[in-house]
Image (cartoon, rainbow, N blue to C red):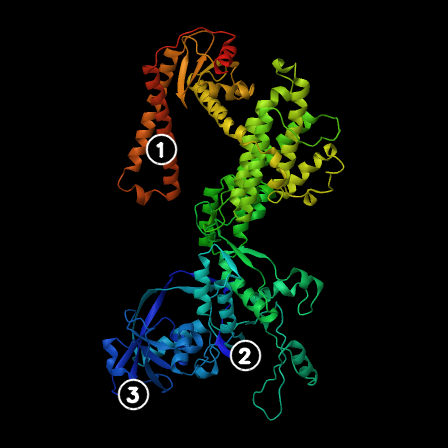
Amino acid sequence: GKKTKTVMILSFLTLSIVERPVVTLCVLSFFSNHSGGEIMVSTTRPETMLGDVAVAVHPDDPRYQDFHGKQCRHPFNDRLLPIVTDTIVAMELGTGAVKVTPAHDHTDFLLSQRHVLPRLTVIGGDGKMTPLCGQWLEGVKRFDARQLVVNALVEKKLFRGKKEHAMTLPICSRSGDVIEPLLKKQWFVRCYGMAQKAIQAVEDGHLQITPHFYTKTWKNWLSNISDWCISRQLWWGHQIPAYRVEFLHSADKQEVGHCYHDGHRTALSCPKAPLYTDVLDTWFSSALFPFAMLGWPQQTQDFQRFYPNSILETGSDLIFFWVARMVMLGTELTGQLPFKQVLLHSLVRDKHGRKMSKSLGNVIDPLDVIHGASLERLQQKVKEGNLDPREQEVAMEAQRKDFPKGIPQCGTDALRFALCSHKMIGEDISLSVSWVLSCRHFCNKMWQTLRFTLGVLGDNTTPVGNLEEVQPSMDRWICSRLYSTVAQVEKAFEEYELHAVTAALYSFWIHNLCDVYMESVKPVLLKQNEGLKHDGGKVRPAASVVLYHCVSASLVLLSPLMPFLTEELWQRLQPFRTDAAAQGSLCLQPYPRSSQMKHWHFPEEERDFLLVQEVTRVARSLRAQCGLTKEKPAMWVVCSPSQAHILLHFGSAVPTLSRVSRFHIYCPEGVAITLFSQMKLAYRNGGVPDFIFLLTSLTQRRSKLVPKLDEILCKIQSPDYLIKVPAHVREQMDSQMSALQQELKTIEDHLKLLQMTDRPTGSYSNDGVDQCQTQSS
C-alpha cells in the first residue's frame, strides 16, 4: 500500500560526507518556567532555534533531574517548550541538554515522533528564513540569520559562550553546499509484509544468497525495515502515476485507485486533475526491472518464458538498495521471486586496498585503462571535476605517485580478464594497473601462439581432421592437460569462482601449451630435429593436429572472458575447419564439456610427466649455478629403472626442455651432480670436471645472498616495523625474505651433497641409454 505523509527525506546519491570538520558549538540559555532556573543547551545551528519545540535531556543525567516534565520559555517568542527525556541525548556532549528542531534535523524528527511534538519549518526551500521567524528574520539567508540570532542572544544576555567542535557535515557533491534537511510530503510504500516474505524465501531455500554469510545481513536489515519513501522532487525520472483530485467542500481529500487504470479513470472524470510532479526513487524503478522489461503486467511470451530469472550477479553494496527491493516488489506484484540465486561480488578498490575516491585521486576510469591515458590527461580530468583546490592538489599528487608515466593502453579484454582473475566473493578486489598490463602481455602471448600455429599449418587450407587417437607421449600429455583444464573450468563455473577459471586457463595456455608442449615439439614442427627424420612423416602431422585442436579449444574456453580477442583469433583458424565444425562466429560455438573429451584423458601420462618437469627444473637450475647458460652440455641421470622408463618414454622432450645437447641415463667420472627424488643429475661441459667450478660458484652465490637476507631481517626485527611500514611493503619484504631463504637452503643442500658424494666413476659412452634400457627391462 502506498500512502503520503510528511517526512524528512534526502537522496544519498547527491550526498557527500565531510568527516569531522570544525564548526562552532554555541551554548545558550533557556529559563525554566517552573523554578526560574536556567537550562543551558548546546547547538551548532543557532539559526534553527526559531523552530525549537522542546528541550531534551538524558533521563539518567543527574544535572537535570529536577527539570523532568517541566517547561521552559523560548527567548524570542515566549512559547512554552516542554523539557523531555530521551536516551538518544548524549550526556557527555556539550552541556548534555539539546534543543529539539524536528523540521530541520533527522534525529530531532525521530524524537518528535516518540514524544508527539509539533514541527515548525523556519528555513524554506530557497535557503531563506520563513515568516514563522518573525519580520526581523523573514527572507534572511540561513547563515546570515545565524549571526543575527547570536547577536540577539548576546543582547538578551542569554549567550553563554562558544567553542570549536568537530562533527560530520553533509555536503552536496554537485553544488558543494551544506545540505539542509526539510520537511516535505512524500509517497511511501509499506514494506514490513513484503520484507517478511523476502526473509522467509531465504530461510526456506527458495532464494539462495552467495556468499552465504550475507543471509544474516539480509535478515537483520529486513527485520528492521521502515516504510520506503519512493518519491523524489527531481526533474528526471519516472513520474509517479498519481493524480490529485480536489473535491468541493473538502479541505484535503484524495482519491487513490488500486491500480494505474483506476486512478486514471477517476482523473479523466475531473478535467482539472493535475498529475503529481514527483518522480519515483530510482531504486523503485530499478526494482521493477526484472518483470517490467518483459512486458508486465501483460502476460507476454517473453514474460512467461524468461520470468523468473535464474541468477542475479551484482555488487554486495547493492544488497539493500536493489536486490532486496527487487525481491519484495517481484514477490508482491507477480507472486514469484524474480530470481532463484543472488551472487554478490566484492567492491573494486585501488592497489593499496583503499576505496576509490575522487578526493584521493585513486579512481581508475575503465576507459583510461582500455585506451590509455597520459599523466597530463589524468590530471586535466581532476581539474575539470568539482573538487576544491586543496582536494585537487591531494588527488593530483596521488596520481603523480601511482601513475608517473600515465596509464598504458591495455585493451578491453585484458581489463575483463584482470577483474575476473580476482577472487570476487568475500574479498574486496584490489585492482592494480600493472596486473592489467600483465594480462595484456598474456593477450600478446595468445597472438604469438596463433601465429606459430598458422605457420605450422602453412598455406595449405586443407581442413584439419578430428583428433580421435593420440599416440606420441607429449601429445597424449597435452591432450590430457586440456581435458583436466576443461574439468577445472566446469567446476569453477558451477561454483561461481571466476578467479579459478582464469587461473586454470592462464596456466594451461602459458605453462602447459607454450612453455612445455610447444617448446618440446618445436624441433619436430620446424623440422630441426635430424634424429626424427625417419618417422617425421608421422610425428609432425600428429603434432600439428594436436596443436590446432588445443589452440582452438582454448579460444572457445576463453571466449566468455576475452570475447574480442578470441573472436579475432578464432576467425583466423576458420580455413582449417571442416564444414561440419565451422560456425559463423565464436559466439555460436558450443562450449567444451569434459564429458565430450574423455577420450583425451590420460592420467598416467600426466602423472609420469611430473617427473620430467622436475628433471627439467633441476637441470635448468644446475646449468644456471654452473654458469652454463649459453652452452648446451651433455646431461646424465642416475635413477631407478622405473624412473628411467618414464624419462625414455617422453623421448626428445627431456633434452629439449632441459636445454642440453643430449641426455644419458649413466653417470661418468668428473661431473657436477645434484640429488632430487632419489635421483642424481650430472653435467659435463667439454670434458672438464665441474666439481671445483660448481663449489666455487655456489660459495660465491651464497656470500652474496647472506648479506641481503641479513639486511631484510634487520628491518623486519626493528621495533617500529609494524607501525611505520605499510602492509603492502611488508608483504613484499616477506616475499623477498622467503625467496632468499629458499635459495640459500638449495645452495646449502647442493654444497653438502658435493662434500659428501664421491666423484662418480665411469666414462662417457654413446650406448649409455641402451645399457640402461637393458638394465630396466
Q: Pointer 1: residues within 10 angstroms few (<14), some, or many (20+)?
A: some
- Residue 612's x, y, as percent? 50, 24
Say what secondary structure mark 1 lies in. Answer: helix
CA gap between label 1 and label 2 equals 65 Å
Q: What amino acid type should be assigned to the residue bearing mark 2? A: Lys
Q: What amino acid type should be assigned to the residue bearing mark 3? A: Asn
Q: Is residue 214 above or below residue 592?
A: below
Which residue, given by chain and number where applicable, does mark 1 sit on?
A: 737
Q: What amino acid type should be assigned to the residue bearing mark 1? A: Met
> Mark 1 against mark 3, which lies toward the viewer?
1
Which residue, given by chain and number where applicable, does mark 2 sit on?
A: 3
Say whether disc 1 or disc 3 marks the residue closer to the N-terminus. Answer: 3
| Mark identifier at residue 33 | 3
Front in this rendered view, residue 715 or 215: 215
Say whether disc 3 or disc 2 marks the residue closer to the N-terminus. Answer: 2
Say what secondary structure mark 2 lies in. Answer: strand
- Residue 402's x, y, as percent? 47, 42
Front in this rendered view, residue 175 or 560: 560
Q: Pointer 3: residues within 10 angstroms few (<14), some, or many (20+)?
A: some
Specify whether 276 is left or right of 770. Answer: right
Specify whether 355 is left or right of 707. Answer: right
CA gap between label 1 and label 3 equals 75 Å
- Residue 554's x, y, as percent? 61, 37
> Mark 3 against mark 2, which lies toward the viewer?
2
